[in-house]
């Protein structure tokens, strides 16, 4: 396998070497993003949905306490919103003043959620750039290889060997294949990350809306 790898680098030239470096860097970023998504428990909303349901039925202390053991991104944001609303409930505020403060709180939590989602989206643009550059680099290597092949063919004149021409062409096409081999899996990874982020963004919007539209504790208790 090592000999095959060495021969691939020798045949493909510097373009294949560049693609190799890009693929290693892309793999490192993908693994780091997988760890980041797993640490933030992206897509895991079971306990949070249950807590929001408890919150809306009046079990506010229980809902907030249940989220302490959940280390997901959504749990942290929803718990912050619940704690802040409970602090508002304890203050002697008029209805108008409470509405103003709650609206400011909602904007603050939304901004915090956007910031956390932005952090999760970091480096995805770099991976997307890899999916665009890798095929172009492969094509560039193919063009250079074809130029070299036809230049050799021209110098050979009437004594040109068709087998040599065919060999030069397939070596030139090798860089295109390497570029596509790098771009395709990275493109799949980027699509997967972006899909998870969109679902997380939608879930956060639904969960936070459920918390803020539940009304004050006195209103919930009276219902």
Image: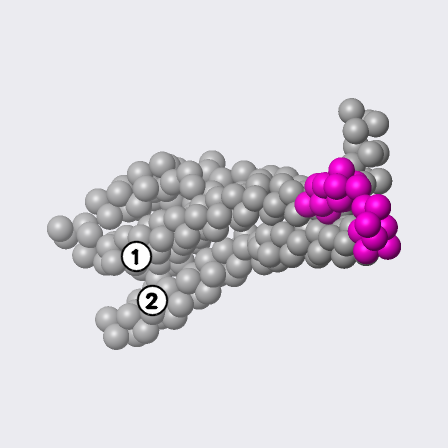
Judge left or right: residue 185 versus residue 48: right
Residue under the image location 13 percent in, 51 percent down:
223
Q: Nearer the viewer, residue 110 or 104?
A: 110
Q: Nearer the viewer, residue 191 or 176?
A: 176
Task: Identify whether 6 is placed above or below 30.
Answer: above
Quarter of the rendering containing residue 108: bottom left
- Residue 31 in the image: state x and y as whole percent: 63, 40
Magenta segment: 152-173
- Residue picked out by circle 2: 102
Residue under the image location 25 percent in, 58 percent down:
213
- Residue 137 in the image: state x and y as whole percent: 69, 55
Residue under the image location 19 percent in, 56 percent down:
219
Task: Identify whether 44 is placed above or below 220.
Answer: above
Q: Nearer the viewer, residue 150 or 121?
A: 150
Asked whether residue 121 is in view, the answer is yes
Q: What is the quadrant of the N terminus in the image?
A: top right
Q: Nearer the viewer, mark 2 or mark 1?
A: 1
Outermost residue to the right: 155
- Residue picked out by circle 1: 209
Outermost residue to the front: 158
Q: Residues within 10 Å of mark 1 (few under 14, many from 20)?
A: some
Magenta region, main secondary structure:
helix
């Amino acid at each position: 396998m090592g000999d095959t790898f060495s021969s691939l680098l020798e045949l493909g030239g510097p373009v294949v070497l560049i693609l190799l470096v890009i693929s290693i860097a892309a793999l490192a970023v993908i693994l780091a993003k997988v760890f980041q998504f797993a640490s933030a428990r992206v897509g895991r909303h079971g306990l949070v949905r249950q807590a929001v349901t408890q919150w809306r039925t009046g079990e506010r202390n229980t809902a907030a306490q249940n989220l302490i053991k959940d280390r997901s991104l959504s749990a942290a944001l929803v718990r912050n919103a619940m704690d802040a609303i409970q602090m508002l409930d304890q203050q002697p505020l008029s209805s108008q003043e409470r509405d103003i403060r709650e609206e400011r709180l909602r904007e603050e939590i939304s901004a915090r959620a956007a910031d956390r989602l932005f952090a999760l989206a970091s480096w995805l643009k770099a991976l997307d750039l890899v999916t665009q550059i890798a095929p172009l680099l492969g094509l560039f290597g193919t063009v250079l290889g074809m130029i070299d092949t036809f230049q050799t063919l021209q110098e050979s004149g009437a004594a040109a060997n068709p087998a040599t021409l065919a060999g030069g062409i397939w070596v030139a096409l090798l860089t295109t294949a390497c570029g596509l081999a790098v771009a395709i899996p990275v493109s799949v990874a980027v699509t997967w990350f972006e899909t998870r982020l969109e679902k997380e963004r939608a879930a956060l919007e639904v969960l936070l809306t459920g918390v803020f539209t539940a009304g004050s504790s006195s209103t919930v208790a009276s219902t």
